[in-house]
Amino acid sequence: MKKSPAHFPGIGTIAYEGPTTENPLAFRHYNPDELFDGKPLSEHMRFSIAYWHAFRGVGSDPFGPGTIVRPWESGKNAISVAKTRMEAAFEFFQKIRAPFWCFHDRDIAPEGASLAESNKNLDQLVAHARELQKATGVKLLWGTANLFGNPRYMCGAATNPDAHVFAYAAAQVKKALEVTKELGGENYVFWGGREGYETLLNTNLKREQDHLARFMHMAVDYAKLIGFKGQFLIEPKPKEPTKHQYDFDVASGIAFLRTYGLDRAFKFNIETNHATLAGHTFSHEIEVAAAAGMLGSIDANAGDTLLGWDTDQFNTDARELTLAMVSILRAGGLGSGGFNFDAKLRRPSVDLDDLFHAHIGGFDTYALAFKVARKILAEGKLEKFVADRYASYDSGFGREIETGRTNFRQLEKLVLTKLGEPKLRSGKQEYLENLVNRYLT
Ligand code: XLS
Ligand code: NI
Ligand code: NI
């Protein structure tokens, strides 16, 4: 491969310089080589860059066009621009020290006039990605298909009322699975795109959900057929772009998967901003997935408490992430998942180095959260408090309740003859909030 010029001139590989550094282009908390339990931090975190935001996002919004102009975007031939863009991306992955990346099929290669042409374009860019992955050691965390951008998907893909659109989406996902496998992708993500509805006046909800399940089954079957061993993930989101998305949150996702016999084939990719849009905390979604043994991966970003849409900001809230990391570590980590920075620059952040500042902040806050969460768990004060709170279920009639060895009659007798009125026991919320703050300061 020919050596490309530096697309980020003047910016080298980001170094770890520790919490006291004054250098804004250095890590203060993320030291990828630092060992924890004998494993480097980079392997604990498995940070990933989202191609669509970092390399396709231009800062456009409904009120105006893009503001972010990258030098590598000029050129008439869409394929060669896509190749140069990808070279810039891999230079960035290396300089920011991200071991993984993620993409949608249409992020990396232009859509053609027909499916055949789109597939041909994709093949060329996948070949290029393969070489770049080999040359840099950067790996694919997950692949996915864009089933929401093209007008054909305006009423959904798998949930489209037109079977023709379903068929097209099936063909697109078939190809996306093949290329994800070819690039060694460790997971494959289904974010609901436009799988939802705008109005029930024109919608057969039951049929649409049945169709979505058929689609997922076909994907699982095809993965088996081609020997794709990656983990399937559903990424819930309650709304946007449609008013009501079917994969609303983790709990409704679990119900969907169990209803249609898909629960063994899927886990969840939880996005912070989607959790808050659903009226939950990030930690809540993690705990719901973990409780079902279905915690898969994280789309790392943040919303804005004052705005009701997916602002996809970089997360620098150490408190929120520390509590999330406590839940993730307690659940045993993310396995083949990772932390994918599904986050974009604000519209006025037009400089090349803004992309570095954004990811440095995201990596650092997560690394800090990881370390503080480990300390919280190691000291065990929080864990002990919660364990003690449920201790009455560890023995006696509490144990019998948990193991299904008692019933209403026996419990009534116990209360009437022995237990009487329960004593009020404080939940100690304020004490616990202060305890958590002590770790953060
Ligand atoms: C959009 C989603 C999307 C998925 C991938 O809100 O977060 O970016 O992560 O399709
Ligand atoms: Ni996402
Ligand atoms: Ni999102």
Image: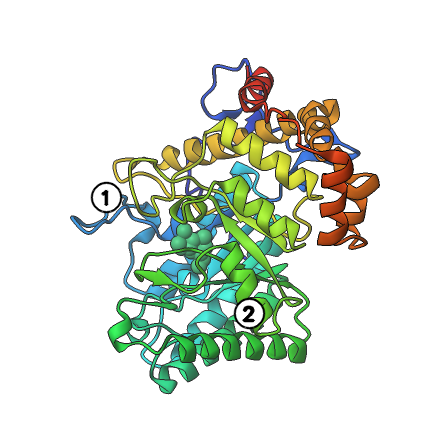
Image point (68%, 44%), residue name: 333
Image coordinates of residue 337 in percent, x first then y, are 62, 51
The residue indicated by pointer 1 is 67
* Residue 6 falls in image quadrant: top left
* Image quarter hosting the C terminus: top right
The residue indicated by pointer 2 is 179
**Camera sees residue 290:** yes
Vertically, is 409 above or below 365?
Answer: below
Residue at disc 1, secondary structure: loop
Vertically, is 255 above or below 50?
Answer: below
Residue 24 left/right relative to 154: right
Image coordinates of residue 147 in percent, x first then y, are 39, 69
> How far apart in space, not on screen, are marks 1 and 2 (Cα)?
32 Å
* Residue 204 falls in image quadrant: bottom left
Ligand 1 location (quadrant): bottom left
Q: Which residue is farthest front?
A: 417
